[in-house]
Image: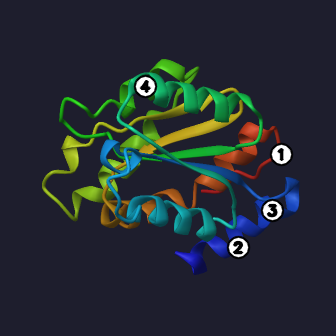
Amino acid sequence: MGAVADGIGESLRSAAGPLRAAIVTISTSRARGGGGVDASGDALAELVGALGGELVTRELLPDDRTAIEGALRRLADGGGCDLILTTGGTGFTESDLTPEATEAVLERRAPGVAEAIRAASAEHTPHWMLSRGTAGIRRRTLIINLPGNPRAIAQSAPALIPTLPHAVALLRGQATRHQS
């Protein structure tokens, strides 16, 4: 991830400081003290690093729609985050409510981001179409749902790395150069 993102992240850093990101892991078992390493959160932290970003906070929440909505609102509305990356809660089980919680707080959708994540997964698993993750904007913050599987995050990162710095620059109101 690093070699591709180094130059891209550098241009964003020099323009208005580093991309500021928050990671929210949604896992009832981990949030209730079920233990285990937050490997998905670690994978997202690697992605933030590959973007040349600054990780401003990392939170662990249960699969609770109200808690997820509250955290997303607080993080986006506080002005300290350009990007919120969530992991977990995007599948088909009854407790997977991350997309619904995210949609409830979005002001504008960014469907191409979620489509790119699913497309990147397609070459790796026949279950790619079962991911219900979404993406969109609240105020000047981009919120993206990613799968709860660290391998799936790593597989989708190459689709995100070239685009996220540009998206953040646009949300910051910075002049950008559109490249083909």
- Secondary structure under tag 2 reads helix
The residue located at (36%, 51%) in the rendering is 30
What whole-number distance in Å separates the C-alpha atoms at marks 4 and 2? 34 Å
Image x and y of residue 160, in percent: 50, 57
Q: Nearer the viewer, mark 1 or mark 4?
A: 4
Q: Quadrant of residue 39?
A: bottom left
Q: Quick one: 3 or 151, which is closer to the camera?
A: 151
56 lies left or right of 93: right
Residue ID for mark 1: 175
- Secondary structure under tag 1 reads loop
Amino acid identity at mark 1: Ala
The residue located at (46%, 59%) in the rendering is 41
Q: Are discs 3 and 2 less than 8 Å apart at CB?
A: no
Residue ID for mark 2: 7
Q: Residues within 10 Å of mark 3 (few under 14, many from 20)?
A: some
Q: First in sequence: mark 2 or mark 1?
A: 2
Image x and y of residue 113, in percent: 46, 43
Query: Looking at the image, which residue sits at the far left?
Result: 126
What whole-number distance in Å separates the C-alpha atoms at marks 4 and 3? 31 Å
- Secondary structure under tag 3 reads helix
Residue ID for mark 3: 13
Q: Are discs 2 and 1 less than 8 Å apart at CB?
A: no
Q: Quadrant of residue 66?
A: top left
Res. 101 mark? 4
Q: Are discs 4 and 2 less than 8 Å apart at CB?
A: no
Q: First in sequence: mark 3 or mark 2?
A: 2
What quarter of the picture does the C terminus occupy?
bottom right
Amino acid identity at mark 2: Gly
Amino acid identity at mark 4: Ala
Q: Residues within 10 Å of mark 2 (few under 14, many from 20)?
A: some
